[in-house]
Amino acid sequence: MDQIAVKINDLTFFYTPDEEDETPRDVLSGVRLEIEKGSFVAVLGHNGSGKSTLARHLNALLLPRGGTVTVFGMDTRDEELTLEIRRRVGMVFQNPDNQIVSNVVEEDVAFAPENLGVPTPEIRSRVDEALKTVGMYEFRTHAPHLLSGGQKQRIAIAGVLAMRPECVVFDEPTAMLDPRGRRDVMNIIRRMKNELGSTVVLITHHMEEAAMADRVIVMSDGSVKMDGAPKEIFTRVRELEDLGLTVPRTTRLMYELRERGVDVPLDTLTVEECAQALACHFKAG
């Protein structure tokens, strides 16, 4: 049984020139990736690196100019497969207001399943389950526009979950949220991966969010520059800085200590790991 959810082969994409700019602008150039089913992959990159453009290729919102994107064995260029691809790969965007279409929370969450032709009793079950998953069931009869930004984002996620996708792509879903809202969304993402077995692709510029993933992909100038486990990627501090990126605060602390001659490990991503490593060092010293 194929364990690959997404296969990208020599993907090239550029936006069509407008009247002001007659030169085609390459956004993606020769990207090659495979994403395993059930994995949690974070994609990092500075603004203009191509990470959001890549995300939009995963459910056929954008189509390759060159190369191929295959999702669960389906070529995104095949128009007859577009609906099925979007059913199996859901997307959550940066601004939840762009995804909310109804005046009542439960109606909004039901919108996508209704358009997929899901039977009414099944829709009711899916809506309730999705709202409970994101912790918004008690708000099911509320008006979305009266909710906070974090609550709106949870409603947008519930709307995608109600489609029962196998993969969910989050395109900077916490960029407009306060720390509590970011924490809530990341908890939902981890629950989706750990409890629902979903394949999760997170586009983010928050290093602490990327550190929670199984795998980190770093993009710059439309191509993949690094690809590996978070502990491996974030030890490459200077390389990341050269790409205009930072590292998690825990890694930065350890890096600064090492620069001052303190023999501590760099691969401590969580506060707990960092504290334990420091305690061991000073105890040994």
Image (tube, grey):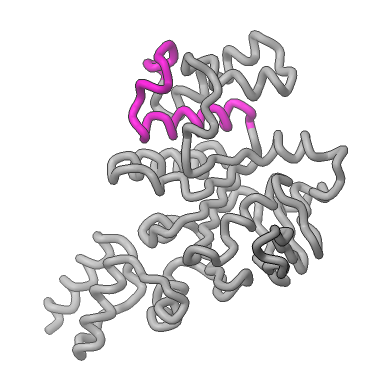
Measured as percent of width and height from the top left, residue 265 is found at 30, 78
Viewer-side residue, 129 vs 81: 81
Magenta span dominant secondary structure: helix
Q: Is residue 179 left or right of residue 144?
A: left
- Work out which quarter of the rendered image holds the C terminus and state it: bottom left
- Evaluate whether residue 28 shows in this view: no
**58 above or below 229?**
above
| Quarter assignment of residue 185 | top left
| Quarter assignment of residue 32 | bottom right
**62 above or below 129?**
below
Image: magenta residue range:
137-164
Viewer-side residue, 107 vs 285: 107
- Asked if residue 176 lies in the magenta stretch, the reply is no
As drawn, the residue found furthest toward the front would be 19
Query: What residue is shown at x 73% (from left), y 71% (from top)?
Result: 30
Tell how many labels. Answer: 0
Viewer-side residue, 44 vs 95: 95
| Quarter assignment of residue 90 | top right
**122 above or below 205?**
above
Query: What residue is shown at x 63% (from left), y 71% (from top)?
Result: 223
Query: What residue is shown at x 33% (from left), y 39% (from top)?
Result: 181
- Asked if residue 160 lies in the magenta stretch, the reply is yes
Query: What residue is shown at x 23% (from left), y 72% (from top)?
Result: 277
- Evaluate whether residue 238 shows in this view: yes
